[in-house]
Image (tube, rainbow, N blue to C red):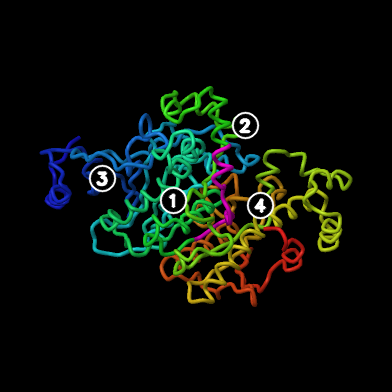
């Protein structure tokens, strides 16, 4: 069936620079069209929320563009489809967190033509200046994409009257191989091109988001796990300065990245394993061969302090001055390692006290084990393993990052705010506690899309209501609704069945692992 264009649709299409046909089908008639700097795109609508998936923000990164900084896309004039997610970056399959991540899975074809982003917005060209929430996905710097069902921005956009953006960028050896020694000055940025892709996405937001009803002067970057690491890095990158106005780091506080010597050695070893000694030869190898070699010995997949795009470590020895005026929301979950170490090795849940020291390794002392047993007398060996590794790793890094941001705040910078998610998911009999990534469905208010992670009951929804409201308030105002974190008060919002502010939660554990950062 076809319908004549009504006047409003005709005006909207022609204003976007789109040649309006005499007739269109009913679905096209209702489809929103946005004009980006590169060309027009047509999306879909879910009630009041307009959705644009697979919007190109950069050119194909294959061939001569491999390992090179991102380039802008070639402009187009015909209306481009933005109805489905774009390709995800080349990568190897990732785990599913012991089954917790299954309801989020949404794999797309892998391709070096992967610089796409997705937008959810309540309005187009309406003159409103909504906060913009730009999400960088997890999976370390190695796997993942912005297409996960967990990251669907529909509910968040509608609930908070905000614009939500998720991003694909280069990963693993395609995004973080430091090839300056193998290729010369032309490859000087190769160790951080994945991060430079994210900078290009922020530039796209700066230049285009007003068309989508967003405010380019109020951009929150946020991410969980590897996404939090990416946000930590972006806060120290001069190329991103001025495009970030708030930052939320969820279970991904990153203090240091690789040094040049380490990164160069990894690249040499990786290239040698592929039988090449020159960066240009690596550019000519088939994508599939590089994907197969991602996990080979010496293949680095992390940013590097290269003296250029990454002139310093993200938060070591202190918080970066360049993002001094960006407020930060920082936190972790109580049992991060149940879905990480436990997802890879179910036997850890059934540890005996005799096997616990071996599982923990030399990095933990017998005195620390004894003190944790005293603090948690009813906990089994497996539960204590997950609590210790979560506290000494994720939470210790988050506290250190918040302390360093607070030190900069004391000198006139923006504050840090802390949170701690302790609500325990009921799935699989409750054995996972509050695992890594549990916060994602809560922050996006996507409990219904997170059944394998959180279940879908009213208790989970209450936690989601509280967390999503705090993130939305932080995006809009720069404060999530509680006092800043300082070393004196250590004010923290604890999200559980009810949300409550606690000064220095789990203080004994914090002191026990204070030397680990």
Mark 4 touching mark 2, by CB under 8 A? Answer: no
State the residue at coordinates (50%, 38%). Answer: 177
Residue 345 drawn above or below residue 468: above
Q: Tell me residue 244's x, y (percent).
A: 40, 61
Q: Tell me residue 255's x, y (percent).
A: 58, 56
- Looking at the image, the residue that sits furthest to the right is 354
Label 4 and label 2: CA atoms lie apart by 27 Å
Q: Which badge, 3 or 1, comes first in the chain's sequence?
A: 3
Residue on which the image places disc 1: 308
Label 3 and label 2: CA atoms lie apart by 48 Å
Q: Quadrant of residue 161?
A: bottom left
Q: Quadrant of residue 333?
A: bottom right
| Element assignment for label 4 | helix
Camera-near label (4 vs 2) is: 2
Report the disc number at residue 336: 4
Report the number of discs.
4
Mark 3 touching mark 1, by CB under 8 A? Answer: no
Residue on which the image places disc 2: 297
Residue on which the image places disc 3: 31
Residue 476 drawn above or below residue 27: below
Label 1 and label 4: CA atoms lie apart by 33 Å
């Amino acid at each position: 069936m076809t319908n004549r264009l009504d006047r409003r649709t005709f005006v909207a299409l022609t204003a976007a620079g789109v040649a309006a046909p005499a007739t269109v089908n009913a679905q096209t008639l209702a489809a929103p069209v946005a004009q980006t700097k590169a060309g027009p795109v047509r999306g879909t609508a879910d009630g009041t929320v307009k959705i644009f998936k697979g919007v190109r923000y950069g050119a194909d990164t294959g061939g001569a563009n491999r390992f090179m900084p991102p380039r802008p896309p070639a402009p187009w004039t015909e209306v481009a489809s933005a109805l489905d997610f774009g390709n995800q970056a080349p990568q190897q399959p990732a785990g599913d967190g012991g089954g917790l991540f299954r309801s989020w899975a949404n794999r797309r074809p892998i391709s070096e033509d992967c610089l796409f982003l997705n937008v959810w917005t309540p309005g187009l060209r309406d003159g409103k200046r909504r906060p913009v929430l730009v999400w960088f996905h997890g999976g370390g710097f190695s796997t993942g994409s912005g297409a996960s069902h967990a990251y669907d921005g529909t509910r968040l956009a509608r609930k908070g009257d905000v614009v939500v953006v998720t991003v694909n960028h280069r990963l693993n050896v395609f995004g973080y191989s430091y090839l300056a020694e193998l290729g010369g000055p032309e490859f000087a940025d190769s160790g951080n091109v994945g991060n430079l892709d994210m900078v290009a996405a922020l530039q796209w937001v700066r230049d285009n988001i007003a068309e989508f009803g967003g405010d380019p002067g109020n951009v929150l970057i946020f991410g969980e796990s590897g996404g939090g690491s990416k946000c930590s890095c972006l806060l120290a990158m001069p190329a991103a300065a001025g495009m970030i106005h708030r930052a939320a780091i969820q279970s991904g506080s990153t203090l240091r990245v690789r040094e040049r010597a380490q990164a160069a050695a990894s690249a040499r070893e990786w290239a040698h394993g592929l039988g090449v000694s020159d960066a240009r030869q690596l550019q000519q190898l088939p994508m599939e061969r590089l994907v197969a070699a991602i996990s080979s010995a010496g293949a680095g997949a992390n940013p590097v302090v290269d003296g250029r795009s990454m002139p310093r470590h993200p938060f070591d020895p202190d918080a970066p001055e360049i993002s001094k005026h960006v407020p930060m929301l920082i936190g972790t979950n109580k049992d991060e390692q149940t879905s990480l170490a436990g997802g890879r090795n179910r036997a850890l849940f059934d540890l005996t006290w005799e096997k616990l020291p071996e599982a923990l390794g030399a990095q933990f002392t017998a005195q620390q084990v004894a003190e944790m047993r005293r603090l948690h007398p009813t906990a089994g060996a497996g539960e204590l393993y997950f609590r210790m590794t979560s506290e000494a790793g994720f939470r210790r890094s988050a506290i250190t990052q918040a302390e360093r941001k607070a030190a900069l705040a004391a000198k006139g910078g923006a504050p840090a705010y802390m949170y701690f998610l302790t609500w325990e998911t009921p799935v699989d009999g409750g054995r996972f506690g509050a695992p890594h990534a549990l916060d994602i469905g809560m922050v996006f208010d996507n409990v219904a899309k997170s059944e394998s992670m959180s279940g879908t009951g009213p208790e989970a929804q209450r936690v989601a209501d509280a967390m999503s409201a705090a993130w939305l308030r932080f995006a809009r105002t720069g404060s999530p609704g509680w006092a800043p974190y300082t070393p004196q008060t250590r004010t923290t919002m604890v999200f559980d069945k009810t949300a409550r502010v606690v000064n220095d939660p789990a203080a004994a554990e914090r002191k026990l692992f204070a030397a680990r950062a």
